[in-house]
Amino acid sequence: MVKSKKQLRHLLKLNKSEKQRKISSETSKKRKGKLHPKWKGGRKISSQGYILIHEREHPNSFISGYMFEHRKIMEKHIGRYLSSKERVHHIDFDRQNNNIENLKLFKNKTEHQQYHTLLRSFVREELCRKE
Ligand SMILES: [Zn+2]
């Protein structure tokens, strides 16, 4: 849940500049390649702006052999595979911020959508309260 006004302000800054994104994804790519000798190099951004990683062996990867990195990170965290119904939400709305602290698991699409609706009304209220 939303804890503070500071967090709410953060929620409102929905979009990082494209340039910033490019730089951060490129530096992490370099670091991974260097530190992981077995890294297959597969890492790209989906059309919706999510990070895709190459995981051909994963039971729920796409036909292309890629899967969403945020789902993989959540699976690692909870120690099991996610079902296709489960949804992983990005708390700061940055689809490329896949730190586990930024990810929140929902049982299904409906619960995820309800959370978004709740957040929207919460943010609106906060905005109205200011001046
Ligand atoms: Zn979400």
Image: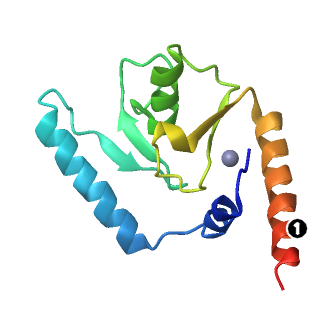
Give how far across and how far down residue 93 sits, in percent: 60, 56
Q: Is residue 127 above or below residue 80?
A: below
Image check: 109 left or right of 55?
Answer: right
Q: Which residue is drawn at the image coordinates 49% and 36% (left, top)? A: 100
Q: Nearer the viewer, residue 104 or 111?
A: 104
Local SS, label 1: helix
Quarter of the image with the C terminus in it:
bottom right
Quadrant location, the N terminus: top right
Amino acid bearing label 1: Glu
Q: Could you tell whether 49 is left or right of 12 in the image? A: left
| Disc 1 packing (10 Å; few <14; some 14–19; many ≥20) | few
Q: Residue at x 65, y 24 (%)?
A: 84
- Identify residue for label 1: 125
Q: How is the image coloured?
A: rainbow
Give residue 122's position: percent from left, percent from top. Answer: 84, 59
- Which residue is at a point 54% across and 44% down the rendered structure image? 102
